[in-house]
Amino acid sequence: MSVRQISVFIENSPGKLAAFTRLLGEGNIDLLALTIADTTSFGILRCLVADPDEACRVITKAGYSARLTDVLAAVVPDKPGGLADVLITLADEGVSLEYCYSFARETAGQSFAQNGGAALVLRVDDLERATLALSSRGVPLINQDQIAALRGV
């Protein structure tokens, strides 16, 4: 069970991120989760949106370099050691974590945190093995429909 993340290269200079987010706003694309890793000359924006295929079409049509990637979204226990337990589960199964980031949104008045969890995006080297490992330990996974339901909150 994975969700589709968009990765976009954005020039690291004044106004470039603002122009990109304006493009998304004009296309009625809501950033539901995001992280940015930067270097001196460019950044990589990674994000979740309700309709990643349509968003990627809009983004690439505007001349940006974008790529869709399958990632896991999970509800991690929001307590000291909660993330460590999830990461140890992955490590015990031989799954490598490439990066992760968290997000906070709610839908229909319900949030992931309501059930004692924090929403986390995980990029791993083996989606299938990671999915099985987390599911077997009772870690709730978030699917693309649940991500799409976050839109417009």
Image (cartoon, helix red, strand yellow):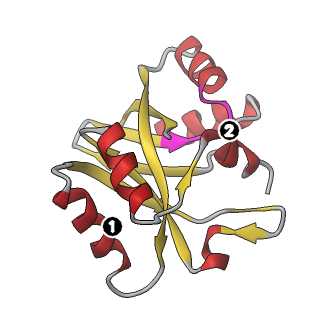
Is residue 127 one of those drawn in magenta? no
Of the numbered discs 1 and 2, the one sitting upstream in the chain is 2
Q: Element type at marker 1?
A: helix
For this rendering, which residue is in front, 150 or 126?
A: 126
Residue that appears at 62% across and 26% down? 55
Foreground mark, 1 or 2, reads 1
Q: Secondary structure at mark 2?
A: loop
Report which quarter residue 42 is drawn in. Answer: top left
Across and down, in percent, residue 20 comes to 56, 34
Residue type at mark 2 is Ala
Residue 111, numbered circle: none
Span shown in magenta: 47-52
Residue picked out by circle 1: 86
Could you tell me which residue is drawn at 27 percent across and 74 percent down? 84
Could you say where residue 61 lies in the image, as x and y percent from the top left?
58, 12
Which residue lies at the image location 72% right of the left edge and 52% below the top edge? 150
Residue 92: x %, y % from top left: 17, 60
Q: Residue 35 in the image: x percent, y percent?
A: 43, 51
Please tell me how crowded label 1 is: few (under 14), some (14-19), or many (20+) other residues with Cα within 10 Å: some
The local crowd at label 2, few if under 14, some if 14 to 19, many if 20 or more residues have their Cα within 10 Å, is many
Is residue 51 left or right of 78 when viewed as pictured? Answer: right
* Res 128 → quadrant: top left
Q: Quadrant of residue 114?
A: bottom right
> Is the Cβ of the residue at disc 1 closer than 8 Å to that at disc 2?
no
**In the orientation shown, which residue stands out farthest toward the right?**
108
Horizontal side of residue 89 vs 78, given as left or right: left
Q: How many discs mark residues in the rendered view?
A: 2
Is residue 95 visible to us here?
Answer: yes
Residue type indicated by callout 1:
Val
The residues bearing labels 1 and 2 have C-alpha atoms spaced at a distance of 25 Å
Q: Which residue is denoted by mark 2 in the rendering?
A: 50
Whether residue 12 can be seen here: no
